[in-house]
Image (cartoon, rainbow, N blue to C red):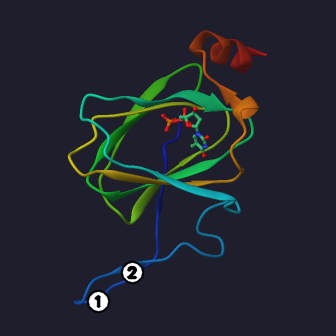
Amino acid sequence: MEIEIIEIPKIKDLRGNIAVIENDVIPFTTKRVYYLYDVPSDATRGGHAHIELSQFLIPLSGSFDVILHDGKEQQKVTLNKPDKGLLIKPGIWRELENFSSGAICLVLASEVYQEDDYIRDFDKFVLFKTR
Ligand code: TYD
C-alpha cells in the first residue's frame, strides 16, 4: 500500500513560515475542516474507513501515528511535520494513536459529515474490500 505524504508549499521566513493549501496541493475540494486536540496519550482515534470521503491529515502541532489498512496489509506512519500531510483516500481503515502532549491533528475532508459514509466494523470493512 502506498503511503501518500504530500508536502505543503511554504513561504519561509525568519519571522516564521507560512504553509498554504490552495489550487491542486490536495486532490479534492475541502467541504469540511475539523481538528483533534487534547487527545490523551493512551487514546486511539479513528477506527473506521470511509466509503466516498477523502481526508488530508496535518500534524499542526506535535506528533501522532496513523495506522492504515487497505484490507490486505497494514502500515504505520508518524506525522510530525506541519508542512507534511497524509492523504487518506476512500476505502482505507485508519487508526490514530500515540499523540504527543499538545498534538493537534487538522483534518481537511472532501465531504460534510455523513455517518452513512463510515464503516466502523473492521470485519465489515474487509468484506467491503473483497466485494
Ligand atoms: P469520528 O469521526 O468517529 O472520530 P475520529 O475518527 O476522529 O476518532 O467521530 C466521533 C464522533 O463525532 C461521532 O459520533 C461523529 C461525530 N462527528 C460529527 O458529528 N461531525 C464531524 O465532523 C466529525 C468528524 C465527527
Q: Which mark is residue 18?
A: 2
Tell me the quarter of the picture where residue 120 sits. top right
Q: Quadrant of ligand 1?
A: top right
Taking the image as shown, residue 30 lies to the left or right of residue 106, namely: right
Residue 122 picture location, percent across and down:
57, 15
- Measure the alpha-carbon separation of dots 2 and 1: 8 Å
Q: Residue furthest right?
A: 131
Tell me what residue is drawn at x 22 percent, y 89 percent. Answer: 14
Q: Marks 1 and 2: in contact by CB < 8 Å?
A: yes
Tell me what residue is drawn at x 53 percent, y 54 percent. Answer: 34
Tell me what residue is drawn at x 65 percent, y 47 percent. Answer: 54
Taking the image as shown, residue 68 lies to the left or right of residue 63, namely: right
Amino acid at dot 1: Asp
As helix, strand or loop, the secondary structure at mark 1 comes to loop
Callout 2: 10 Å neighbours few (<14), some, many (20+)? few
Q: Would you name the residue on which mark 1 appears?
A: 13
Callout 1: 10 Å neighbours few (<14), some, many (20+)? few
Residue 76 picture location, percent across and down:
38, 33
Taking the image as shown, residue 4 lies to the left or right of residue 125, namely: left
